[in-house]
Image (cartoon, helix red, strand yellow):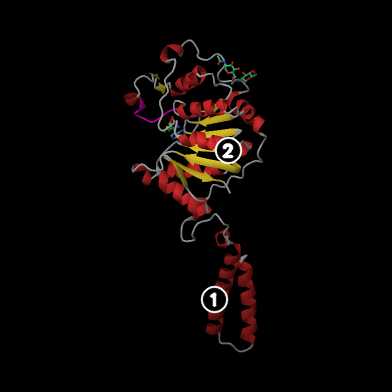
Amino acid sequence: MKTDYVAAASKLASTFHRRGFTKPTGYFFILVLAYYLGYLSALTKNPSTKTLNHNQPPQSADIDHYQFQTQCANPVPYQLARKIILNRVFNDTSPYMNFPQPHIEPFLRHKRIKGWGSTGAVFENLIRKVKPKVIIEIGTFLGASAIHMAELTRQLGLDTQILCIDDFRGWPDLPSKFKDIKMVNGDTMLLYQFMQNVVYVNATEKVMFLPYSTQSALENLCQWGVFGDLIEVDAGHDFHSAWSDINRAYKLLRPGGVIFGHDYFTVADNRGVRRAVNMFARVNGLRVKADGQHWVLESR
Ligand SMILES: C[S@@+](CC[C@H](N)C(=O)[O-])C[C@H]1O[C@@H](n2cnc3c(N)ncnc32)[C@H](O)[C@@H]1O
Ligand SMILES: *[C@@H]1O[C@H](CO)[C@@H](O)[C@H](O)[C@H]1NC(C)=O
Ligand SMILES: *[C@@H]1O[C@H](CO)[C@@H](O)[C@H](O)[C@H]1NC(C)=O
């Protein structure tokens, strides 16, 4: 395209030449004109100079940090959420079937549920308020908060599906802290102990899971159109993990839904979770509310 401008400019210059411009002045003129036209054409084509939409950041920042752009599929009906996951993740077979396998059973405890702030009042407050059909939990560990939510929805007579996202690896020094969660040939039994806990409380019909990284699980839910009306964020607490999880999760929130997460107030999370939540709220024009240790954002 730029070459068209150059050709036009040189044509123009030869006209000027005939009108008695000296050669050096003419060439200088062509040069300036070509650059100017090239500059104009770049302005009209470069997408970064297009009008920014409402959720974009100040222009001085590198906007890639704010772009989580996969277009989600249209939301599927609530009743299909579990079915789609069984189909796409588990080859249409319930992962609870024939659980636990005989070779795994000796490594599990009947019940080993430990969490952090997993039964705070925020869970009951939001479940009563939203009456969610689908809850997405990002960061599940042994299932303490998921099981608490399953109990609450049962008590309230809600037909709620809880989708748990966790890679069920925990973190690298997990075995030294949780000695009773066994490791078998380098494989932590966290996933199986979580499943055992769900079986123990008889919540297999309510609790389904995606045993993958939050990034790939959330991207896939987005592509499948599996949305939630209540989303809890409690996976990686460093800034980049929290920022990525919140941005990806918010796209899966139904209108009128609520997204919330743990550790808004701890000192360490001032640099991680709180920074990410505050920045997300600012960029999207939302207001952060606090409930106990948790942050809460309502969809617009
Ligand atoms: C604080 S624990 C969750 C606790 C749980 N919500 C409760 O209340 O009991 C954080 C969990 O996030 C998971 N996690 C951290 N980063 C992750 C990632 N990038 N992808 C998947 N899971 C992740 C860890 O495996 C761990 O189980
Ligand atoms: C998936 O299910 C089909 C039908 O039940 C079965 O034939 C196939 O072996 C399964 N695939 C895997 C990887 O288990
Ligand atoms: C387990 O839960 C199902 C519904 O999910 C219910 O029908 C059944 O009675 C429960 N069983 C026990 C032992 O609580």
Number of residue marks: 2
Would you identify the image quadrant in which residue 217 lies?
top right
* Image coordinates for residue 211, horizontal then vertical, percent: 51, 28
* Residue at the limit of the structure toward the bottom, as seen here: 20
Instruction: Depth check: give the residue in front, 97 or 34.
Output: 97
Q: Residue at the spot x=45%, y=47% of the render? A: 277
- Position above or below: 6 against 254: below
Split into quadrants, the picture shows ligand 1 in the one at: top left
Amino acid bearing label 1: Leu
Magenta part of the protein: which range? 168-174
Badge number at residue 31: 1
Question: Label 2 crowding class (10 Å Cα cut-off): few <14, some 14-19, many 20+?
Answer: some
Amino acid bearing label 2: Val
* Image coordinates for residue 192, horizontal then vertical, percent: 47, 20
* Image coordinates for residue 154, horizontal then vertical, percent: 57, 25
* Image coordinates for residue 225, horizontal then vertical, percent: 63, 38
**Which secondary structure lies at badge 1?**
helix
Q: From the viewer's perspective, is the residue at label 1 or at label 2 nearer?
A: 2
Left or right, 49 with respect to 268, comes to right
- Position above or below: 163 against 10: above
Say whether residue 292 is magenta.
Answer: no
**Which secondary structure lies at badge 2?**
helix
Left or right, 137 with respect to 74, comes to left
Question: Label 1 crowding class (10 Å Cα cut-off): few <14, some 14-19, many 20+?
Answer: some
CA–CA distance between discs 1 and 2? 64 Å
Mark 2 beta carbon near ligand 1 (under 8 Å): no
Left or right, 85 with respect to 247, comes to right
Can you identify the residue that label 2 sits on?
A: 130
Q: Residue at the spot x=59%, y=29% of the render? A: 161
Going from N to C along the chain, the mark reached first, 1 or 2, is: 1
